[in-house]
Image (tube, rainbow, N blue to C red):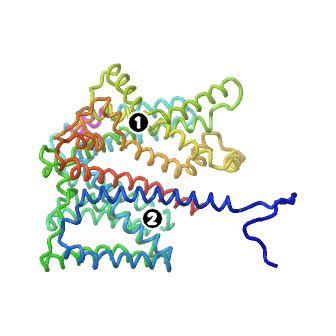
Amino acid sequence: MATDQSTETWYGTNEAVSRVRGQMFKAICLGATLLALLSVFVLLLYVANDAFQPFSADPGWLLTFAATVLVPVLGAMGYYYTRDTRGGETATIALGLPIVSLLLTGGAFIIFEHVVSVYQWLSILLALAVAALIVYAHSRVRTGADLERLAVLIAVPALTLYLIPDLILSLPMLPTQSLTLLGSFVVPVSLAVGWYVRKRRESGREGAIAGALVLVGAAAGIGAAPVVGISPFVWMLLVTITAVPVGLYLESVVRRGAGVSGLAFPLVVVVGLLAGFLLADALGFAGPTPWLDWGFLTNPSSRTPEDAGFYPPLVGSVMMLLVIVVSAFPVGVGAAIYLEEYAPERGRWGRVVDLIEINIGNLAGVPSVVYGVLGLALFIRQGGFGSGTALVGGFTVGLLILPIVIISSQEAISAVPDSMRQASYGMGATKWQTTRNVVLPEALPGVMTGNILAMGRAIGETAPLLIIGAPAVVRIAPDSFTNKFSAMPRQIYTWSSEIDPAFQHGVLAAGVMTLLVVLLMMNGAAIIIRNKYQRRD
């Protein structure tokens, strides 16, 4: 006997309940989602068209790249979607990981070029090493002096960071920049890679080989880098920050044997691009004249649209993020640990804690311009810091995202099952040992995801920078946290008020695309971290 698919009987009654409204609600939600995605996609296409101007190229150039890049890429994507979904995941990561690694390499270059020199970095590492040895020796000699150890843990690093860097930098002779970077950056990275491989493979021999390969590959740049036209400094950064994660991922995919076909996708893209450029050049087809090119990323700002660049705001944004990472994230994560693990839940103090959490939730929704006014009053007028500096900008935007960091970290910590805490207590662990060895390692992926998303919010804020007096245009990249700086959204806002249409449509679109790429990379990294640990669980 046929049944009516549009109705069903509610258990316990004789009423027929219609399913039409539920299906209509489902369709409306799906339509709203598709409409939102389509609107964002159209907006991105509109901005990308102004930034890259693809239709300024010859039709033959467009047809050439459609044949060499677009058709193979769409064919590969269709294959992965229908035949090999695991290969599709590998293809996405294999293509995105080198791009993200190159962006991180550029950020490291900016840090060493404008924030801290390799000699300062070396002196800081040596100071921290001396401090660690002193703290370790004290913990071995004075095993029962907990308060004394806490004082040593705070005072010794501060004292060594105050004395040792100046002592090292005052030496009459120092190694070359390449050798200094090799010893202060490449060697620690090679040790970290060796430890990682040893832990994952449970083989000390393979860990030693991996670390040695990183060290040898980076050191080879001293002789090989000039041959390929780059400096040994850039070579070492490319090896340690770009080649190492890409190589480790490729090795892990090949070793597992799952999704290996996805490794061909980056080759399809790269070979297609090379073939397209060679064919277009051989046939004499002129390419587009984009606003977003290498010169735009490396040039300073200019009154001429064709010469306008984005480099000083890029440096300013990196410096502001460094201040945020150092100031806001430790405070936010520490507050979340206290509220979730140590704060009283009952009594008078429990009500105070509830009031604090309510206010933190309310602060997360306060408009950003209010935090700009707070930063102006707190750091500039009362604190005496200069207006429009990277330090003030980082502190102000750090206050803005601090509630977000606290809330996201709280959620990650509260998601750790209580059974793990109880098992740790059952083994005789203290509250701090349980928090350090059980709770924090389990909550770390969620904490990292929340912090990365908060950084994405911070890097796109404009109103607080306007209030604290960030300059409209900075033609020289700042080399100190107390110098005047301009961030990417501040520079974009300045270009939007220019009368010249070339600024409003071309240069502005190039700046927006650069900012969007950085934001999408941050959000993509957060999603990958979350999905990886969800699959592990």
Taking the image as shown, residue 174 lies to the left or right of residue 481, namely: left
Q: Few, some or many C-alpha atoms within 10 Å of disc 2 (few <14, some 14-19, many ≥20)? A: many
Under mark 1, the amino acid is Gly
Under mark 2, the amino acid is Val
Does the stretch in magenta take in 412?
A: no
Looking at the rendered image, the quarter that the N terminus falls into is bottom right
Residue 214 spot, x, y in % from top left: 33, 64
Q: Nearer the viewer, residue 456 or 143?
A: 456
Residue 218, by quadrant, is bottom left
Q: Which residues are magenta?
A: 163-169
Does the stretch in magenta take in 164?
A: yes
Mark 1 highlights which residue? Answer: 398
Residue 8, by quadrant, is bottom right
Q: Earlier in the sequence, mark 2 or mark 1?
A: 2
Residue 487 spot, x, y in % from top left: 28, 41
Q: Nearer the viewer, residue 239 or 160?
A: 239
Looking at the rendered image, the quarter that the C terminus falls into is bottom right
Residue placed furthest toward the top = 382
Q: Is residue 325 above or below residue 527?
A: above
Q: CA distance from mark 2 to mark 1?
A: 35 Å
Residue at image position (39%, 79%) is 75
Residue at image position (12%, 76%) is 284
The mark lying in front, picked from 2 and 1, is 1
Taking the image as shown, residue 172 lies to the left or right of residue 139, namely: left
Q: Secondary structure at mark 2?
A: helix
Residue at image position (58%, 48%) is 437
**Which dot marks residue 197?**
2
Residue 184 seen in the figure: no
Taking the image as shown, residue 271 lies to the left or right of residue 85, namely: left
Residue 322 spot, x, y in % from top left: 35, 41
